[in-house]
Amino acid sequence: MKRLAVLCVVVFVLASSVRAADEKVGPWNIGALKRTIPAMRWADQSGPVHSLFYAGEDYQGHATEVFAFYASPRTLGKAGAKTKFPGVVLIHGGGGTAFAEWAWLWAQRGYAAIAMDLGGCRPNAPIYDPNTGAPVPNQAAKKETRQRLPNGGPDQGHLQKFDSIGGDTSDDWPFHAVASVIRAHSLLRSLAEVDAGRTAVTGISWGGYTTCLMASLDDRFKAAVPVYGCGFLHEGESVQKPSIDKLGDRRDLWVKTYDPSSLLPRCRVPILFVNGTCDVHYPLDSYQKSFDLVPGPKQMRIQVNMPHSHPSGWAPKEIGLFIDSHCAGGKPLPIPGKPVVEDDRVRLPVKSVTAIQEASLHYTTDTGLRSKRKWQSVPAQVGEGVIIAPRPLADANTWFVSVTDDRGAMVSSTVQFANP
């Protein structure tokens, strides 16, 4: 009987392993994608930021390649041959491409960084500043600085993002975007100079959207930072809602398959949501709803009137500090608790290994489009493990408390909504 019981346990474990290896979520075979180290070839290794191509998913009946920039402390000439680095995957936003300066910034920080193009294109080779050695900023910002790959995947227009839903998924941009990022992650982890157990992902706008999907699908990441991007693109003031509504009887299929709101309940990768109060692409109420869906470790950084762009999206220091805390032994960001209104004040507990320097209450009494509302900020008192802020005005409909530590790193409480 004991031998039979042991045999049953072995069979169960093997069956579970097979299921995990072949786990399918929506259109993606996640197990197969994570196992696959895509074929790759270097395109240029002459500068500090290298360029390469790696194999993507089939598109319109043909094999594809994905272009990417790669940089590390070693490519920058700042590390020896035997040093291993944590890794980071960088996902551009809509209308963007692989940005050499973004990969360079992370290599300067001590990471091996890969930044891929998710629109079937290749940007021009980077030009370097002769004084700093850094790639010249914004040189790939315009579409005319890129060329379409003869074997590239789908473009990143609305047709490919929305209208292609239904039938074969191989022409859907979200399908390719996720698969290409997982492949990039597997490739990054396979490099000899990368510590495969210390990798993170961050993305901006549509890249933030994709980061939400990645954090929900690829559990090999140790940290994720979606900037601007979130779920619930089919609700409220989302600028994507009209495109999704036009899908008619395919609308629900798109939401179920590709909207982050359908996948974030799977997310257990530690995640930091970064956004502004007035973002037109990803409204604050959709952002908070997306945050609430995550069952794993999560934090939030909401900035009043944060601009929406690639440089503004990779600028916040909290992104690097959060990823450092999970991949490079850095100190964690402060962790606010739940804000509680008590009489004429708001009490916010805070756990922090760093000293809290300042705090503020932010609120708006405006109505109408969230992207147009004006915000007010008032200072709050910093106590021992607690923030005491004035109670928001009676007609304040949306508010939160921010906390800044002695590194200048800011995080915020969850956003509170009194009225629509």
Image (spheres, rainbow, N blue to C red):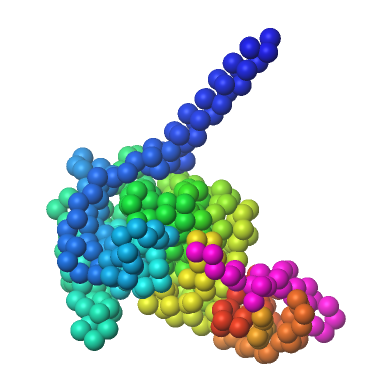
Quadrant, the N terminus: top right
Q: Residue furthest left?
A: 150
Q: Magenta residues?
A: 328-354
* Residue 413 appears in the rendering: no
Q: Quadrant of residue 128 in the image?
A: bottom left
Depth check: give the residue in front, 238 or 260.
Answer: 260
Q: Is residue 406 left or right of residue 324?
A: right
Residue at (28%, 70%) from the top-left corner? 77
* Residue 130 appears in the rendering: yes
Depth check: give the residue in front, 387 or 174.
Answer: 387
Q: How far across and down, in percent of the image, does residue 115 sit?
A: 32, 62
Depth check: give the residue in front, 332 or 140.
Answer: 332
Q: How far across and down, in percent of the image, does residue 184 sit?
A: 34, 52
As for residue 181 lying within the magenta part, the answer is no
As for residue 335 lying within the magenta part, the answer is yes
Q: Is residue 396 left or right of residue 53?
A: right
Q: How far across and down, in percent of the image, does residue 69 sit?
A: 27, 63
Depicted 18 relative to depicted 201: above or below: above
Q: How far across and down, in percent of the image, does residue 90 sit?
A: 37, 63
Residue at (68%, 13%) from the top-left corner? 2
